[in-house]
Amino acid sequence: MKILVTGAYGQLGNEINELKVNYPDWNFIFTDVDSLDITDESAVEKSFVQNNFDYVINCAAYTAVDKAETDGETAAKVNTLAPELMGRYSAQFNTKLIQVSTDYVFAGDSYLPYSEDHPVNPQGTYGKTKLEGEIRCIHENPQAIIIRTSWLYSSFGNNFVKTMLRLAKERGELGVVFDQVGTPTYAADLAASILKIIENSVKDSSNFVPGIYHYSNEGVASWYDFAKAIFEISGVTCKVNPVLSDQFPTPAKRPHFSVLNKSKIRNTFGIEIPYWKESLKICLDRLEK
């Protein structure tokens, strides 16, 4: 069992690396841009030829949402071209592919949780490049699994949780938007779910059911609620004031609503999804240690 994990330095890649101890019989190969440039077709082809992977988990992404507005070329290479190449060579080498995507493929103007077949309408460069990556990936490999997620955080890398804890040390008061609603997702939970999908399909290949799926933790929160929970659970004293998005103008438009409907991934793969606050407690406990 040989599994390629791209984007190894990111939040999700790091969490998969943490969980690999639970799968001692599997050979994980972790790469990032310094060891495999997944936007370089010849490098990708060579890697598939040499390794004959059984599975690929493409966690690599250009996630600087605001920067993407002025650096669309780089965003497109990582978010569009790379999934296309992963799709092409996974199909060619009969490798099972799991591609990670985002809630930003939607306009963010719904009031009901987004199902996988809801019309897509990305509002910024980041969302547009991720959606085009999905389309090209499926075109190259119709047998791929695509998992859209939202509001990812972990004990690794830069994320909202770490930013809030840092700012709370510097200031006694913070303004956080309350008119953007979604669900915080602990990257460790997503990592565990991806590995469970692979584990089930190792037992029986018919368990690998291609298509688009949604995964986030359960429940709903605004960024304001999220910040309040971070401080309450970690015992940090910092006043949080609810503010409107237009008080924090950004180059890229944020979705006002990005709650994902997870029933498809739950029902198809028998995945249990934790409530966001329970997972936040686990992450904060890890950060404290």
Image: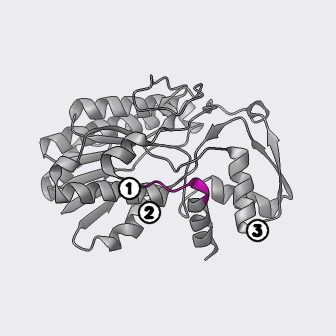
Residue 227: horizontal and vertical position, in percent?
Answer: 72, 53
Q: Nearer the viewer, mark 2 or mark 1?
A: 1
Kindly indicate the quadrant of the structure image that contains residue 84: top left
Image quarter where the N terminus lies is bottom left
The answer, for residue 10, to whether it is visible in the render is: no
- The residue under label 1 is 193
Q: Amino acid at mark 2?
A: Glu
Q: Label 1: few (<14), some or many (≥20) within 10 Å?
A: many
Q: What's the distance in space between the residues labelled 3 and 2, CA to CA?
A: 25 Å
Query: Which SS class for mark 1?
Result: helix
Dominant secondary structure, magenta: loop
Give x and y (percent) for residue 142. Answer: 22, 34
Name the quadrant containing residue 239: bottom right
Q: Is residue 176 visible?
A: yes
Quarter of the image for residue 99 reads: top left
Instruction: Decide whether residue 275 is among the magenta residues.
Output: yes
Q: Amino acid at mark 3?
A: Gly
Residue 7 numbered mark, or none: none
User: Mark 3 highlights which residue?
Assistant: 235
Q: Earlier in the sequence, mark 1 or mark 3?
A: 1
Q: Which mark is residue 15?
A: 2
Task: Please report the bounds of the magenta region as a residue range.
Answer: 271-277
- The answer to which of marks 2 and 1 sits earlier in the sequence is 2
3D distance between C-alphas at marks 2 and 1: 11 Å
| 118 drawn magenta | no
Q: Label 1 sits on what residue type?
A: Ser
Q: Is residue 241 above or below residue 75?
A: below
17 or 82: nearer the viewer: 17
